[in-house]
Image (cartoon, rainbow, N blue to C red):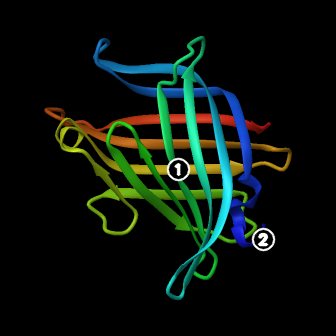
Amino acid sequence: MDELGPLAPLAGTWEGAEGLDVSFSHSQAGAEETPFRERISFEPFGPVNNGEQVLHGLDYRASAWRIGEDDPFHMEVGYWLWDGAAGQVMRCFMVPRGSTLIAGGAASPGDRELRMSAEAGSEVYGILSNPYLAEAARSVRYELTVRIEEDGVFSYEEDTVLAFRGEKELFHHTDRNRLQRV
């Protein structure tokens, strides 16, 4: 697992019910807080050779449910990648709303806190959306902080900055959770 660098502690399945999603509610015309539970599975793979670049990673799937509901309100699939030679950690994912992104940042093998970001329009660590979302609710920036604790726990905080059609102010759609290995 050394080839996974700072991602190695994440391999496995995780669950947490301390999630909080702060998103825009059209029915309330403003921010709405939604408590949620979540399950994430990370499966190691690699190496992936891109010429001289060698990546190792985690194939992952995540689902989140509002507390008390049976159907997920959020799902995503993707990869977390480690480029040991370049000291870069990356998260590539897609959500079924028609958005995909690759976020990244500098890291070292033993890091217990990882920071990644992406920006719309960037050719490196960027964000893409379907035509409707690009017009109505464009993601312009994404920031993620992951903290890996020693006792089989990890937490994250993410901020997706959105530009809504007809609005001057940007909206910060945030999510956070604390998960334990199962």
* Residue type at tag 2: Asp
Q: Secondary structure at mark 1?
A: strand
Which residue is found at the position 36% from the left and 43% from the top? Answer: 161
Residue 158 spot, x, y in % from top left: 51, 43
Where does label 2 land, which residue? Answer: 2
Q: Is residue 152 left or right of residue 48?
A: right
Q: Earlier in the sequence, mark 1 or mark 2?
A: 2
Task: Say which amino acid is labelled 1.
Answer: Leu
How far from the left and from the top, in percent, is residue 18? 66, 26
Image vertical order of residue 38 relative to residue 79, above or below: above
Residue 167: x, y in percent?
18, 33
For label 1, the residue is: 144
Figure check: 27 above or below 130: above
> In this rendering, which labeled residue sits more in front, label 1 or label 2?
2
Are there few (<14), some (14-19), or many (20+) residues within 10 Å of tag 1? many
Q: Which residue does the image show at 82% across and 44% down from the upper left?
A: 152
Which residue sits at x=57%, y=15%? 70
Point out the residue furthest to the right here: 151
